[in-house]
Amino acid sequence: MRREKEAPWSGILVYVQCRRGELHPCSPELIGEALRLAEQSKEEVWVLGIGSGMEKVQKELQGYPVSRIFLYETDDLFLPGWYASLAAGCIRETRPSVVLIGGTLEGRALAPRLSVEFRTGLTADCTALAMDPDGNLIQTRPAFGGNVMASIVTEKSRPQFATVRPGVMEPVPRGKGFSPVCFVKSVFSEEKTVKITIREDETKGVAIGDCRLLVAAGRGVKKKEDLEMLYHLAEILGGELACSRALVEKGWMPPERQIGISGNSVRPECLITFGISGTVQFMAGMRQAKRIIAVNSDPEARIFQIAHHPICGDLYEIVPELIQSVEKEAGYQSGGV
Amino acid sequence: MRIAVCMKQVPGVSEGSMDPRTGVLIRTGLSAVTNLYDRSALEAALRIKEQQGGGIHVFTMGPGKAEEVLREAYAMGADHGYLISDRAFGGADVLATSYTLMQAIRSAGEYDLIVCGRQTTDGDTAQTGSALAAWLGWQQLNWVTRLEVKEDQILAVCRMEEGTAEVTAPLPCVAMVERESFIPRMPSLKLKMKGRKMPVTVISLQELEDAVPEHYGLKGSATRVKKIFAPKGAERKELVYKSGVEGAAYILELLKDTGQETGI
């Protein structure tokens, strides 16, 4: 076998999810984190996008201070095997030391295929990243349901793959005067063995992961009917109602509204919990919320350990009062919206 | 129709500990249960078997105690169980685990379909199934909410960022199923009794095509846990006691302070 002397692995490649010209909202976050890491390691930052509508994507990427952009115009919907083969081709050519991928449904399906392709390490759902002097990416993530944090390294192989959930890293704003070099390629999978169609009639379910404000209900709610006032509170605050596992098990709330390790990870600007004691599983799914206001009648409730504003009180007293004052504040007629 | 299902034994409570030196999970002294997501994987396989016939083989990797997973699978209706167990397999990350699973499944024969749960409750990465598909060079279906087999095709409904997708893929493939859509059946008493006597096949390193110990376990892993530490934010905020009116006023002030886009 012919073996040329290969360039060392260097640079940080950011995989951005693109669909019909739209960049996934977590893209500026990943680019921002890559730039921060590159400052430590003095490396270049590149962007790789695979999907459709690349002409528009190219415009959307203008203004980010990255060195190069590689875009593959291809089949409209995500096919793990095909997208992985395109991404692998780009990685083989560019030889980045680090590849950052969004912890989305697409990213989490794609990343494992790439890590196997390159026989290298992948760390899921990193909450903090740093570079050591040897160019090793220090990947920190919660372990064991969030009881401990683990710092993980991929020392002996490259690239180092990491996924990061949306909402975790600080986004970088677009600036003026940056025009990265952009390479666009059109490639379509020849074999259409996998066919995908999106159901048009489907009404999208609630995505509590995308909400900036969440109200969450737990075991402290005594009857199913009492959830009405919490749904109402969430609505007038412009948010959604979420819950702990207990209420899903009772059949009072659907699983897509459940926060926790067995439900959804959420990172809202603000989370107000009512009657939630805070199991480990629950807290692992909301620890990243920017501001946690917790109301519970038990002063020993575990959630008070992590809440920014722990309040010992009765939800049945506080919620009706809160609804009234919010409505008054918003200029609503009392009693009706 | 030959279906393989991957199942894992995990700590009963998510309060496991790690050896601070090696970063390897300490399993001793913890109650162990079958990963609840994997019971849904078996449920999905059982539903296909009910329509198509065929056999379901369950693969679990772990210490001898992990045989309990196979007994539980028998009680739900699995036909045969493989315990992938060897000292050399310990301390594996996603790369090494998925490689071990691939080797073990291949050593057991040919399969049309492999079903995995979406994630485990201990590792919580949701990566192993996709990595297994990559080793095999098979197509993969992620976030599956419906799974059917028609002739040599798989018809699935999958969650995607764009919404719900109907996917048709050729067999063989690896499907990773969502728990809510495949609520596992209760184990039957009859099967449970029968399952106690059913044999289990142990797959150790020497049964694998690639029997090089360095390709497995801690040595075959690409990632290493460098350190573990307590999460930040351990310093506790002062608890305030509030009545209804006070509590409402207090929260309202906090919300105003948070400000942006909350509609207040």
Image: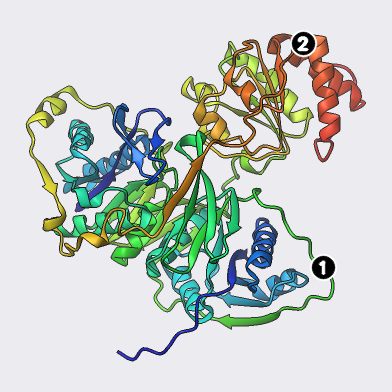
Chain to which the residue tagged by mark 2 belongs: B
Rendered image: mark on residue B242? 2
User: Residue B168's image quarter?
Assistant: bottom left
At label 1, counting other C-alpha atoms closer than 10 Å, the crowd grade (few under 14, some 14-19, many 20 or more) is few
**Residue sitting at x 73%, y 38%:** A269
**Residue sitting at x 62%, y 17%:** A275
Mark 1 and mark 2: span between their CA atoms? Answer: 47 Å
Q: Is residue A111 above or below residue A270?
A: below
What kind of residue is marked 2? Answer: Lys
What element does badge 2 sit on? loop
What kind of residue is marked 1? Answer: Gly
Apparent side of residue A250 relative to residue A216 in the rendered image (left or right):
left
Image location (x, y in percent) of residue B103: 21, 59
Image location (x, y in percent) of residue B22: 37, 47
> Split into 4 quadrants, where in the image is the C terminus of chain B?
top right
**Residue sitting at x 67%, y 37%:** A289
Q: Which residue is mark 1?
A: A175
Counting the numbered discs, the total is: 2
Image location (x, y in percent) of residue B25: 36, 40
Q: Mark 1 and 2 residues: CB-CB less than 8 Å, in contact?
A: no
Apparent side of residue A299 relative to residue B113 in the rendered image (left or right):
right
Q: Is residue A249 above or below residue B66?
A: above
**Residue sitting at x 54%, y 55%:** A138
User: Residue B216's image quarter?
Assistant: bottom left
What element does badge 1 sit on? loop
Q: Is residue B264 visible?
A: no
At label 2, counting other C-alpha atoms closer than 10 Å, the crowd grade (few under 14, some 14-19, many 20 or more) is some
User: Residue at the right extreme?
Assistant: A331
